[in-house]
Image (cartoon, rainbow, N blue to C red):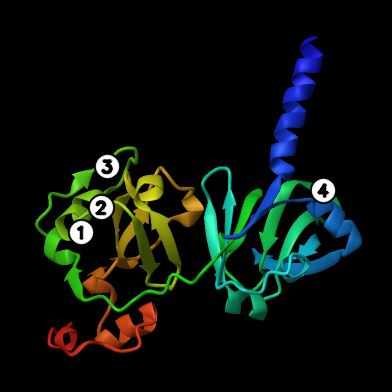
Amino acid sequence: MKRLTFLIILLGIFSSLMALTLKTSEQSNNLDVEALYMAVPSELVTEKEKDGEIFTRTWKGVKLTDLLKKYNLADYDLVKFSSDDNYLVRLTKAEISSHESLIALYLNGEKLEGNRLIIPDMPGMYWISNISLIETEAQANLDLPSMFQFAEGYLDDFKLIQNPEPFVDVEGYYLPQLLQMVMPSMQGQYQLIGRDGISHLLDYNDYLAKAVLVKSESGYILQSPQMPGGMWIKDIAYIQKGDIAIIFRAQFSSWEEVKTLTGWWTVPKEFRAIDF
């Protein structure tokens, strides 16, 4: 009886790892990725250098473009990938069309415990594992803000916190402490951009309510116990909700740099009146 119970639990875990849902604004489909792989198998070879040695990996699975094509998905701007551990990444339609990407089921001939998104020409943080939900979205354009505040104008007046919970051996500030000084309401979706261009659109309650700005030599690392470490943003440079933006002044030397990072189509005259 114990063995049967254990087997049922194992099957439940395995099923949850293999379950994958494709969701649009109009419908939801439970995907049989294994069957799709058997019908249209694809392969990607990646190389990684470590300690002067090149390691080659052969991934087999389903091309993301083939999956979207099978379900006649062409009318979208973004695709969001989510896992059960709260990890998420988004790819634009342009990124999907310009990068070869694979939902891998096998690595070097061995079956993976779940799946993994492989995008050779993009940073490893986009290689999300154990995807449970793929969701198409309309583009949430980053509108030009009508108001902004420099983060340092507030942080310089805050007391630096040693070991902000739950993190240890670091110092920094709680992100909500900053947001409540700038935003009329802290609830909602925030666009966060690191100086390296890494960007996330995150809900406050799900990801940011316990977030910390950890002080580093080059700026602040935005990290949160509510999100996996792979989603943490190094050198956070820009935060926006609605038409209000928070700019980390130390990450820029000109408004043109802000414009390039955010994709603004212009810099308002009233903004240019304030120098970096």
Residue 36 left/right relative to 167? right
Q: Nearer the viewer, mark 4 or mark 3?
A: 4
Mark-to-mark CA distance, 4 and 3: 40 Å
Assign a secondary structure to mark 4: strand
Q: Which x, y percent locates residue 267?
A: 26, 87
Residue type of the residue flagged with mark 4: Lys
Q: Which residue lies under the disc numbered 2?
A: 186
Mark-to-mark CA distance, 2 and 3: 20 Å
Q: Nearer the viewer, mark 2 or mark 4?
A: 2
Residue type of the residue flagged with mark 1: Met
Q: Which residue lies under the disc numbered 3?
A: 164
Q: Which residue lies under the disc numbered 4?
A: 111
The residue that appears at 45% across and 68% down in the rendered structure is 198
The residue that appears at 79% across and 68% down in the rendered structure is 44
Residue type of the residue flagged with mark 3: Pro
The reply to whether dot 4 and dot 3 touch (C-beta < 8 Å) is no
Mark-to-mark CA distance, 4 and 1: 47 Å
Residue found farthest to the right: 39
Q: Which residue lies under the disc numbered 1?
A: 183
Rendered position, 251 above or below 180:
below
Q: Which x, y percent locates residue 231?
A: 47, 56
